[in-house]
Amino acid sequence: MYEIPDMMRAIDPEAPGGPEVLRIVERPVPRPGPGEVLIRVAAAGVNRPEVMQRKGQYPPPPGAPSILGMEVSGTIVAVGEGEHREVIGQPVCALISGGAYADFAVAPYGQCLHVPGALTMVEAAAMPETLFTVWTNLFERGYAAEGDVVLVHGGTSGIGTMAIGLANLFGLTIIVTAGSDEKCAAARALGADHAINYKTQDFVAEVKTITAGKGVAVVLDMVGGDYLPRNMQCLADDGRHVSIAVQGGLTATIPIFEIMRRRLTLTGSTLRPRDSAFKSLVADELTRTVWPHVEAGRLKPVIDRTYPLAEAPAAHERMEAGDHVGKIVLVME
């Protein structure tokens, strides 16, 4: 049996602000409810929605803890009502709605994935948010299939690097954009078929050249704003445009007749507000389709840098600077 203390370290800002609000405080150790497990946290991934939450721009969904952090790895140390006690001791990673920047976190067991020997706990903490996001949007909403050419913006972000890894596993040709020649070289080294420096090249023209004028089957976009009409120019007939963030603007002006004439699909999603039943279904699908590749060591997240929990401000500063390639991870010990 595991000894569970009453109090724990956590990062739970009292008010929005800059990275300096990410101070360690004491909070009660949460208790798992029905269908939930308590995880002794080993590591927690750092994600852009957490930066937005820290600034007061992205409040947690109703019922979610105010403690930051949406993905976690660690060991199950207690279970709630309805969960079998034999899962205690399992190493897992999980997508959660909040609470990962702490010594202990609660997760619905259905959203947990077993951590195989091929992954370190740091790598495991860097998997859930990007894997759930890329799988549900690129493959499920975007219907990417073997042989397709896809365009993914932010090629060296956590999302972008995960998309590259999955594209290589599932037979996609992947074009990415990045903000420097160095980042483009890094993306190609990770397995991107083509990388476009969006600061020095017109990505619409480059995509047309790469695809011999045909365009791509799917665009995965985290920019929004004026990228949307430009992305549409990159799509092949019957192409799918999937929006997952709006870092460049909330609105866009698009040519509606072009959607009709070329039979384009514009869709998108946000993962965090979806209910546990949906996320558990995604976890089941990932267990069947992707996790065998993880267990075999064929899919790993790209780790940019790790920080101890006390250096969470530096981790957020690095994310906001945009110099990272892959995932930034907080380590609890």
Image: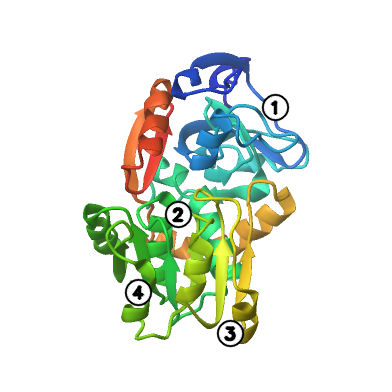
Residue at x 53% of width, y 26% of height: 102
Query: Of label 2 and label 3, which has the lower sequence position?
Result: 2
Separation of marks 2 and 4 at Cα, in angstroms = 24 Å
Separation of marks 4 and 3 at Cα, in angstroms = 19 Å
Separation of marks 2 and 1 at Cα, in angstroms = 31 Å
| Quadrant assignment for the C terminus | top left
How many marks on residues? 4
Which circle, 2 or 3, is nearer the viewer? 3
Circle 4 is placed at which residue position?
205
Residue type highlighted by circle 1: Arg
Q: Is residue 191 visible?
A: no
**CB contact under 8 Å: marks 2 and 4:** no
Query: Of label 2 and label 4, which has the lower sequence position?
Result: 2
Q: Against 195, is 240 above or below?
A: below
**CB contact under 8 Å: marks 4 and 3:** no
Query: Percent from the top left, x then y, of residue 24?
Result: 49, 16
Q: Nearer the viewer, residue 168 or 173?
A: 173
Residue at x 73% of width, y 53% of height: 277
Query: Which mark is drawn over residue 31?
Result: 1
Quadrant of residue 152 within the rendered picture: bottom left
